[in-house]
Amino acid sequence: MVETVHLIYYGVILAAGLSFLAIQSLHARLDRPLLTFPIVALVSLAVSLRDIRFGADTRVYLEMYKSPDDFEDFVEIAYITALRLLRLISEDGTFYLFVSALATNLTVYLAFVRFNPRLAAFAFVLYCATPVFWAANTLILRNGLAAAFILYAAMILVTAGRTKVFFAFALAGGTFHYSALVHAGFLSIANLSTVKRFVISVATLILAALSLVYIFPLFSGILDPWIKRFLDYQYYASTGQFAYDNDGFRPQYAIPVLSVLGALLLWTRLRSTEMLLFKYYLALVMISAVFWGNILFRDRIYLPAQMMEPLIIAFLIRRAVKDNSMFVMAGTAIVLMLAAVSILIWAPRNVLRIY
């Protein structure tokens, strides 16, 4: 059910989108960060000033922030350390939600800037209009930040290759959420430009899947209490049935279909860096497909790929529409429709609802 809060969020995203598009038209590149960073901060503030009953896990994260020592045994060290440092500044829950949202959204925006400064603002508007933005900011906060680090690491791969900075960002993501280590390992060998690398990537994916299904449950007793976070996986290992299912409306899964079809249709128009980014995107989608039937794993493994999708859509539109005015019109129309579906249809049933 659409409520006033959803209309407010829709208005916030539209206002931010119009502001970004206006800034994007400026020719003075040095002035853009001074204008765009405050908008990223304001969007992050808007999503943090929410009823804590929005987002099924919000109250859990606030409980962690209230007493981080109680979660030290089974939550990643960087996250617990960050909570303790933030508490030295303020113990207010809204402050924590704002810093968490700002860190994630700013990292995503800077990743887009690294890939293409001229498309970054538009890509970030698309990001705010997609379901992944609302999931990362209201539901899976820790995993959202880890995925943002992996997104930035992927942009380093595309623009500079496998450097020490790539591994630094990948490791940083893993210290906030262990799933980032899976992404980092797979990305580091997943350049699908040759048949050899494609075979290596697929073999790695198969071995990882077999390990999770047949080996991982053997350690369930040894790894307690850390393993408590994977109770649904233990249930699957013993019964062959997944413990979680999500029957909500899923427009987010139409986005990868459109991304793949668009890339195939426009492949000859794409630049080399865009092709490479799309290949890394496919690599992440491949590994997330292993967990597609289990919502707990599927959403966490798929998250970095979801964060890439707004950037992919942005450069696909840019390659399809050469005229600047038509590009702005097409982009505005897509943002309007995508935000309406995400915030007014999908979010009230999946994320932005009272739990």
Image (tube, rainbow, N blue to C red):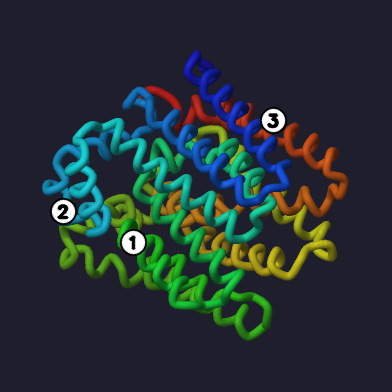
Numbered label attached to residue 178 = 1
Residue ID for mark 3? 337
68 vs 73, nearest the viewer: 68
Helix, strand or loop at label 3? It is helix
Which x, y percent locates residue 310?
Answer: 63, 48
Q: Position of residue 152 (x, y in %)?
A: 50, 60
- Residue drawn at the location 50% of the way across and 75% of the way down: 188
Disc 1 and disc 3: Cα gap in Å? 34 Å
Question: What residue sits 32% from the left and 72% below the top?
Answer: 215
Q: Is 272 on the left-hand or right-hand side of 30?
A: right
Comparing 5 with 194, the one in front is 5
Q: Which mark is residue 89?
A: none
Instruction: Determine the image quadrant of residue 175.
Output: bottom left
Circle 2 — which element? loop
- Amino acid on which the number 1 mark rests in the picture: Tyr
**Residue most extreme to the top:** 4
Number of marks drawn: 3
> Which residue is depicted at the point 51% across and 59% down?
151
Secondary element under disc 1, as helix, strand or loop, is: loop
Q: Position of residue 204 (x, y in %)?
A: 49, 77
Name the residue type under label 3: Met
Amino acid type, residue under disc 2 in the picture: Glu
Q: Mark 1 or mark 3: which comes first in sequence?
A: 1
**Residue 254 appears in the picture as rendered:** no
Q: Which residue is tagged 2?
A: 72
Residue that lies at the very extreme toward the left in this rendered image: 69
User: Nearest the camera: 5 or 246?
Assistant: 5
Q: Residues within 10 Å of mark 1 (few under 14, many from 20)?
A: some
Q: CA distance from mark 3 to mark 2?
A: 42 Å
Give the distance between the C-alpha atoms of the residues marked 1 and 2, in whole angstroms: 14 Å
